[in-house]
Image: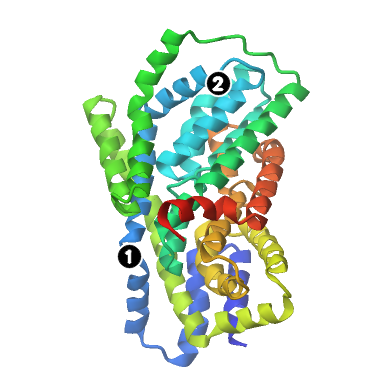
Amino acid sequence: MIGAVLFGTLFLLMFLGMPVCFSILAACLTYILPNGVAIAGIAQRLVTGMNSFVLLAIPLFTLTGYIMEQTTLSVRLVEFVESLFGGFRGSMGTVTIVTCAIFAALTGSGPATVAAIGAIMMPALERAGYPRSTSAGMIAAGGALGPIIPPSANMVVYGAAMGLSVSKMFIGGVLPGIMIAMALCAVNTVIAHKRDFAKNDRHHPTKEILRRTFRAVPTLVLPVIILGGIYGGFVTPTEAAVISSVYAMLYGFLSRELRPRALGMAFTKTVLTSSTISFIIAVANLFGWILSRTRLPAIIGGAIISVIPNKWVYLAVLMAILFVVGCLMETIPSILILAPILIPAGVELGLDELHLGVLFCITLTVGFITPPFGINLFTAVSTTGEDYISVVKGVIPFMIVMLLCVLICAFIEPIITFLPDMMLGA
């Protein structure tokens, strides 16, 4: 009965259009008010939800992305990738996807990747003959690599909520991210040949490639610092986030590309984005406390195990739930609400906790480009100037391939667990 009231209130208010954070808070009140829980205890739970060293990585990586938008770091990255992949049919689409993948390794933000790369690549894709719908959809799909290829805010939140190593999750996201990026490039190549786009005969001489590589060094050094520091065990993800944001600011000031007004804009966007995430995490922590107090996760987990015969059926059911939830709810609330309920049942059935954690995050990431509420779709609309329906039509082929890649990761566990086990031990 308690569960029906909690989740019924939550989903009803979300359906009526109330912001997710207030929907969660209102659902919590349906338990708190009748049971006489002390107000001071509620405040403590809200503060405790945000009081985590790991969560500091989210605003810092977000700041890095917004600073890169204000400097030429992203432009230099595009020029470098174009010099390497610019000589075959559909090459401009491949440049777009590869650039998104590298940019994702710098910021971990899907919308930031769409905004930064979309503004540069949309005109280039049009000049290469791509329809605006396909271009906008490709940029939205490329931006979805942000929360998959580390660093990833979703993995930071999951690790903090479920007590899982964020460093291991980051490493576990590398191979799935590369696989999805390659699959998106393959879709682009098929579209280019099917529509007979003109072949790009422009080959950059070695001297030009070297020049662009040298110009891109300030950008290419950043993922080496972030990922090399984390994987080498020199820094934690939070410390790497501090280094990345300081590096981006130092570059901006030394190159005189980052003006005080632009820095202020980057800080403002970071505060707005991070405060929203922090409040959601705070109220979700209160929601999680209520779930643990009422033992709902254990009850629901027991019910799942009683009707699901094995781990393969569990994975199929989990994927179906997350695909649906991903297109209806924001990713971070989905992690905080559903992971404590669904994941323990999978662990009980013998599945690897790291595999489930990374899989949970990358499955929900598909929701970034899934109608009706995919955030990358709306970002692509504002960045490219295309209408919503046009962007959705363009993203469908890429979304289907992403779904297939996620299913492969679900049923072939080593794709996620191989690198973490090899680098950090099982």
Q: Please tell me in which quadrant of the rendered image residue 265 appears.
A: top left
- Count neighbours of disc 1 (C-alpha within 10 A) and say few if under 14, some if 14 to 19, many if 20 or more: few
Q: Are marks 2 and 1 in contact (CB under 8 Å)?
A: no
Please say whether residue 372 is visible from this viewpoint: no
Q: Amino acid at mark 1?
A: Ser
Where residue 234 sits in the image (x, y, percent)?
28, 49
Where in the figure is residue 276, as x and y percent of width and height?
42, 57
Image quarter of residue 142: top right
Residue 156 appears in the figure: yes
Q: Is residue 270 left or right of residue 293?
A: left
Eyeballing the image, is 278 above or below 391?
below
Label placed on residue 52? 1
Q: Which mark is residue 85?
A: 2
Q: Residue at x 46, y 50 (%)?
A: 171
Identify the residue at image location x=48%, y=8%: 205
- Give how far across and how far down residue 176 sits, in percent: 57, 47
Where residue 244 sits: x, y (%)? 31, 42
Q: Considering only vertical position in the picture, is 423 above or below 131?
A: below
When the figure is inspected, residue 148 is found, relative to residue 9, above or below; the finding is above
Element type at mark 1: loop
The residue positioned 41% from the left and 8% from the top of the image is: 207
As drawn, the residue found furthest toward the right would be 194
Q: CA distance from mark 2 to mark 1?
A: 42 Å
Q: Earlier in the sequence, mark 2 or mark 1?
A: 1
Quarter holding the N terminus is: bottom right
Report the label total. 2
* Viewer-nearest residue: 383 or 63: 63
Residue drawn at the location 67% of the way across and 78% of the way down: 305
- The outermost residue toward the bottom is 35
| Kind of residue at badge 2 | Phe
Q: Nearer the viewer, mark 2 or mark 1?
A: 2
Q: Give the side of residue 413 with respect to residue 423, left or right.
A: right
